Amino acid sequence: MDRELNLLMKNITGDVSAVAGWLWQRGWAERNAGNISVRLAAEELPSLPEEPSTLLPLPGRCESLAGFHFLVTATNTRMRDVAARPLETLLLIRISDDGTGYQIVSPTGETDLRPTSEMQAHLCIHEMLTLRRPDHRVVMHTHVTELIALTQIRELCDAQKLNSILLGMHPETKVFIPDGVGFVPYILPGTRAIGEATVKALEDHSAALWEKHGLFATGRDSLETFDMIDILAKSASIWFICRSAGYEPEGLTEKQLNELAKLKF
Ligand code: 2HA
Ligand code: ZN
């Protein structure tokens, strides 16, 4: 591999591979569960050699992302392998100038690796983020057991009900995820329809919970995005622990939540 490209890949894959390992260790990434994409900033991409590589079709047109580079987990990749072998499991791609296709920049040469099966959702979300929240460059999807379990309870399948639980279980949740999560009713994964529904849910939230499937979260970097997922999982665990012990958790009061809303970090 070209020396400059190799160095670039080492720099940009470090945090993603660390987080991939944590997702696996936390039990939120069974088999090939989960996927991560990062929109790269121009300054992260020192003049890469213009190697002609095959133009591959994107699942849907996304003109507003034309020319952007993304680091993205390959389909059928295990998070534990992303942690152990990032250069063999992460793709660096460039969206074509007309937004209909992409080229694989790394690895160089012929490769069977292709972007995540949830690429549609990732691209739809990145399109929305570049317009509404351009500092959020990371999109992370993972199967957080505790959060999925909440969506197996029909009466909780509603953003307001989920947030009244999640925000009330621990002060940190209100402080770091003040708007809580959006909710996406069950839709077949890997489709544009679920991508569009997720974009809608993420317009007012930094995370969206897919019914009976998992979480999509966005953030400025991989570590911040992981932290948010971790905090949400903690809240859900506290709720289940109280319920399993036979008690209805009290939750923080309105006054306590209002106080926390004013805290600055
Ligand atoms: O990447 O998690 O939703 C595998 C999945 C699909
Ligand atoms: Zn999934």
Image (tube, rainbow, N blue to C red):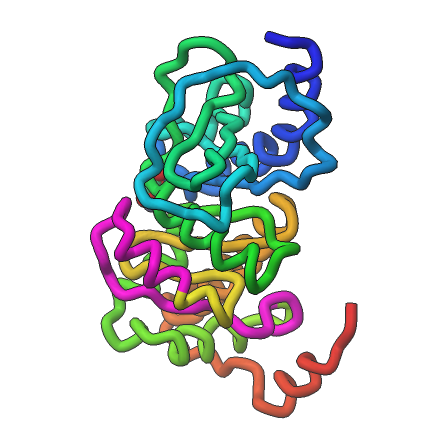
Residue 248 in the image, given as x and y percentages of width and height: 40, 79
Quadrant location of ligand 1?
top left
The residue sitting at 50% across, 26% down in the picture is 90
Q: Quadrant of the N terminus?
A: top right
Front residue of 138 and 225: 138
The residue sitting at 59% across, 73% down in the picture is 178
Q: Which residue is the extreme one toward the bottom? A: 255
- 99 lies left or right of 49: left
Magenta-span inclusion, residue 174:
yes
Stretch in magenta: 173-199
Residue 55 in the image, given as x and y percentages of width and height: 39, 24
Q: Is residue 205 above or below residue 18?
A: below
Q: Is residue 241 above or below residue 79?
A: below
Q: Which residue is the extreme one toward the right? A: 265
- 40 lies left or right of 55: right
Residue 156 in the image, given as x and y percentages of width and height: 31, 74
Front residue of 138 and 57: 57
Residue 81 in sight:
no
Magenta-span inclusion, residue 144:
no
Q: Quadrant of residue 35?
A: top left
Residue 121 in the image, given as x and y percentages of width and height: 37, 49
Q: Quadrant of the C terminus?
A: bottom right
Q: Which residue is the extreme one toward the front? A: 98
Marks counted in the figure total 0
